[in-house]
Image (tube, rainbow, N blue to C red):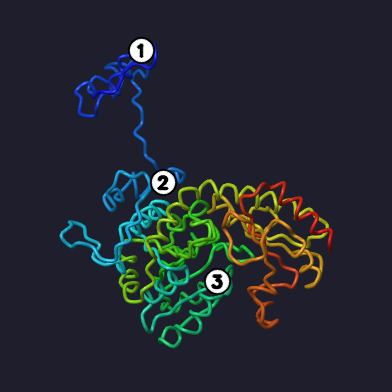
């Protein structure tokens, strides 16, 4: 029975009556889907409307890999949300079978395509953690007898793996200061560097590698360039467009963005990612479909979240730089920061982490951190909640004074990862805590 076309005494217009007909009714054809002929010409004259390119990060974060791209075929459904395909094995009669979950999965493929679009990469591999992404990349691209050059400021676990583990596999390593271009050139002149690896920005002092310059110097000598862009996120920095060959992320941070998913990813050319994927198949480290779905959901709001992180961190840095109880602020957006010009040339935003040195000793700085009421004392960064830590008694606890000094870790250093709370609330909390020292 066809639905009624009147509501009480109100009769619906003819076009709305058509919309109430059953879907197989020919009356649906009467509703025009395009403007009448000549209307666009009349409105626009000789100017034709441009075709949408869908290249903004905000749009790609929402639709890439799904409505835009190949993802619609990966997990075909009429659901707006990407389905969680939990099957571990797949029917090989399908034209594009994923075969086995350790190697690929439809939900994970949607995620990989979304990240590729955001990074302007040909391909992406999603892994079970950021460290898994780093280890798999190094093992895949640096053979025995190879040579890895990295910086003294790179992620501590990566630094340990490069210096300790790779040496047992016949792979040499050289560590240089991030801004020491003369040492970089000297090592490259040996003509045996396989891969250069660096974080930009670094954690926790937010130093920035000149990616364009490093890529140019390394490529002259045939060395690959791998940038860990975790503290920037794809919203603020796109290393592939600056000349890097590979990008890795701890996607647990800004990309997933809610402190509830452990994941990593590596993006680059199809040729390089294929090599890394082959090693990944051997090593394991596949992300679960459920985690991939939560990662996809987090990515959809990444542009909005990172904008809030950037804005709050910039206000925080300016506030602290002028405060009499703060000795120094580490944030590349500040013109006083030694990395400002490099960051300005390659980043569109500066991230949500602000590090600063309190005018006090170890105990006084601990009193300040303990007095904060909004941020949680915890490691990690990039989530909705603000987090704070004192590296000397957390991430560098148990390290020698020599090692802490070498890495710029002072007793009074605080790393503040801004969440998406209102800045004024965080400001008032920091100001009251500073009064405790």
Residue 99 location, x and y as percent? 23, 65
| For residue 282, side relative to residue 410 (left or right) | left
Single out the mark in the foreground, 2 or 1. Answer: 1
Element under disc 1: strand
Q: CA gap, disc 3 to disc 2?
A: 29 Å
**Mark 1 or mark 3: whose residue is earlier in sequence:** 1
Tags 1 and 3 in contact by the CB under 8 Å rule?
no
| For residue 400, side relative to residue 173 (left or right) | right
> Who's the residue at 39% across and 41% down the image?
54
The quarter of the rendered structure image containing the C terminus is bottom right
In the rendered structure, find residue 60 and report the number of the disc placed on it.
2
Q: How many marks?
A: 3
Residue 68 location, x and y as percent? 34, 45
Tags 2 and 1 in contact by the CB under 8 Å rule?
no
Q: Which residue is mark 1?
A: 11
Pick whichever, 168 or 102, lies toward us: 102
The quarter of the rendered structure image containing the N terminus is top left
Element under disc 3: loop
> Who's the residue at 76% across and 50% down the image?
428
In the rendered structure, find residue 154 and report the number of the disc placed on it.
3
Q: Quadrant of residue 395?
A: bottom right
Tags 3 and 2 in contact by the CB under 8 Å rule?
no
């Amino acid at each position: 029975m066809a639905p009624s076309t009147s509501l009480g005494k109100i009769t619906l217009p003819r076009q709305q009556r058509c919309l109430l007909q059953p879907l197989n009714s020919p009356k649906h054809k009467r509703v025009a889907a395009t403007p009448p002929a000549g209307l666009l010409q009349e409105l626009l004259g000789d100017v034709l409307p441009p075709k949408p390119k869908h290249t903004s990060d905000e749009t790609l974060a929402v639709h890439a890999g799904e409505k835009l791209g190949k993802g619609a075929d990966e997990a075909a459904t009429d659901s707006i949300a990407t389905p969680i395909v939990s099957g571990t094995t797949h029917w090989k009669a399908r034209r594009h079978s994923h075969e086995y979950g350790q190697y690929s999965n439809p939900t994970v493929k949607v995620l990989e395509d979304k990240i590729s679009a955001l990074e302007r990469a040909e391909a992406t591999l999603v892994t079970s953690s950021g460290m898994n992404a780093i280890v798999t990349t190094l093992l895949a691209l640096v053979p025995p007898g190879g040579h890895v050059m990295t910086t003294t400021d790179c992620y501590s676990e990566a630094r340990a793996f490069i210096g300790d583990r790779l040496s047992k596999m016949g792979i040499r390593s050289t560590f240089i200061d991030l801004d020491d271009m003369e040492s970089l050139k000297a090592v490259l002149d040996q003509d045996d560097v396989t891969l250069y690896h660096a974080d930009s920005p670094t954690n926790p002092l937010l130093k920035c590698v000149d990616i364009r310059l490093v890529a140019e110097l390394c490529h002259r000598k045939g060395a690959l360039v791998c940038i860990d862009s975790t503290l920037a996120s794809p919203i603020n920095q796109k290393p592939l467009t600056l000349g890097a060959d590979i990008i890795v992320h701890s996607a647990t941070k800004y990309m997933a963005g809610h402190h509830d998913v452990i994941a990593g990813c590596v993006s680059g050319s199809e040729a390089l990612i294929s090599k890394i994927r082959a090693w990944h198949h051997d090593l394991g480290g596949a992300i679960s479909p459920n985690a991939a779905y939560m990662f996809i959901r987090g990515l959809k709001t990444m542009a909005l979240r990172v904008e809030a992180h950037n804005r709050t961190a910039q206000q925080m840095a300016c506030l602290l730089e002028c405060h009499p109880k703060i000795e120094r602020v580490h944030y590349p957006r500040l013109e006083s920061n030694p990395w400002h010009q490099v960051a300005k040339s390659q980043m569109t935003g500066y991230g949500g982490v602000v590090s600063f040195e309190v005018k006090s000793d170890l105990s006084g700085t601990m009193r300040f951190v303990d007095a904060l009421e909004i941020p949680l004392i915890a490691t990690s960064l990039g989530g909705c909640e603000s987090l704070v830590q004192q590296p000397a008694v957390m991430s560098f606890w148990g390290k020698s004074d020599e090692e802490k000094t070498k890495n710029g870790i002072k007793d009074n250093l605080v790393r503040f990862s801004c969440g998406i709370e209102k800045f004024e609330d965080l400001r008032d909390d920091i100001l009251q805590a500073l009064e405790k020292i």
